[in-house]
Image (cartoon, rainbow, N blue to C red):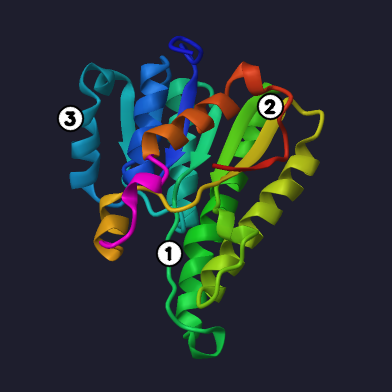
Amino acid sequence: MLSEFEGQVALVGGGTGALGRAVSASFLEAGATVIVTYRRESEFDTLKHAVGPGAARLSGYGVDVMNESGLTDAISDLIARHGRLDVLVNAIGGYSAGAPLWETETSVLERMLSMNLHSGYRLARAVVPTMLKQGRGALVNVAATAAFNHMPSAGAYVASKAAAVAMIGSLAADLKGSGVRANSICPTIIDTEANRAAMPGADHSAWSKPEDIARVILFLCSSDARLIHGAAIPV
């Protein structure tokens, strides 16, 4: 798959986060031109340094995807510069747990819905029309196994991830026969610095590595996965 995406353009929402970095690097290694959205310039600088020569095919927009006008401007500029968009990966997300539902503040639910549901909605809404005009494209939204395995004391998080899976499934039904595919992946705990700090006593060796998850995403966006559409794949 090293040259599978040569000449293609991939947008990675949250492409400078722990998982987003691995996804961005994987697409660069496979020959794609990669554009990321990010909130912190320092994280984008870190990504550019990490990918080495691949940085020549890497660019980014410092935009909050919840800012609809800012996101629209960024996508318009992306299409004007590159003339196409082949892949969208949404790696934006957040986690909150530790209290039963009746003790969970409304602000927590709103934050989880914003990060885990609305981000994917806004990104898909912004890019699908371009993919439909092309007659081809692949979208992957990062959800979580919590969408199906409902753990306690995480109602807001579980609800937001379950809603995201349902939304992408409905989008896939909308896109049937168009040449544009949409799928979800559902990781368990991802081996990141933040998760290690939050759970220092856990068995980190059992956690999914960002690079391994990125390979699954790469596969789902490749021609080898052309028959996979509307799936929610646990990883």
Quadrant assignment, res 235: top right
Disc 2 versus disc 3: nearer the observer: 3
Q: Mark 1 and mark 2 in contact (Cβ < 8 Å)?
A: no
Residue at left 62%, top 59%? 147
Q: Name the outermost residue toward the bottom.
A: 102
| Residue tagged 3 | 49
Under circle 1, the secondary element is loop
Report crowding for label 2: few under 14, some 14 to 19, many 20 or more residues within 10 A (C-alpha): few
Q: Does the magenta stretch include residue 44?
A: no
Residue 206 on the magenta segment: yes
Magenta span: predominant SS is loop
Quarter residue 211 falls in = top left
Amino acid identity at mark 1: Tyr
Residue 47 placement, left or right of 175: left
Q: Name the residue under label 2.
A: 133
Q: Report the span colored magenta.
A: 200-209
Give the label, 2 or 1, closer to the camera: 1
Residue nearest the viewer, comparing 235 with 232: 235
Q: What whole-number distance in Å separates the C-alpha atoms at marks 2 and 3?
A: 35 Å
Question: In the rendered structure, which disc, 1 or 3, sits on the residue that comes first in sequence?
Answer: 3
Name the residue located 32 percent from the left edge and 45 percent from the top edge: 18
Q: Mark 1 points at which residue?
A: 95
Marks 1 and 3 in Cβ contact (< 8 Å): no
**Residue in the picture at 45% in, 22% down:** 82
Instruction: Identify which amino acid the numbered label 3 is placed on.
Output: His
Residue 212 % position (x, y): 43, 33
Q: Residue at x 19, y 38 (%)?
A: 46
Q: Which of pointers 2 and 3 lies earlier in the amino acid sequence?
A: 3
Residue 162, image quadrant: bottom right
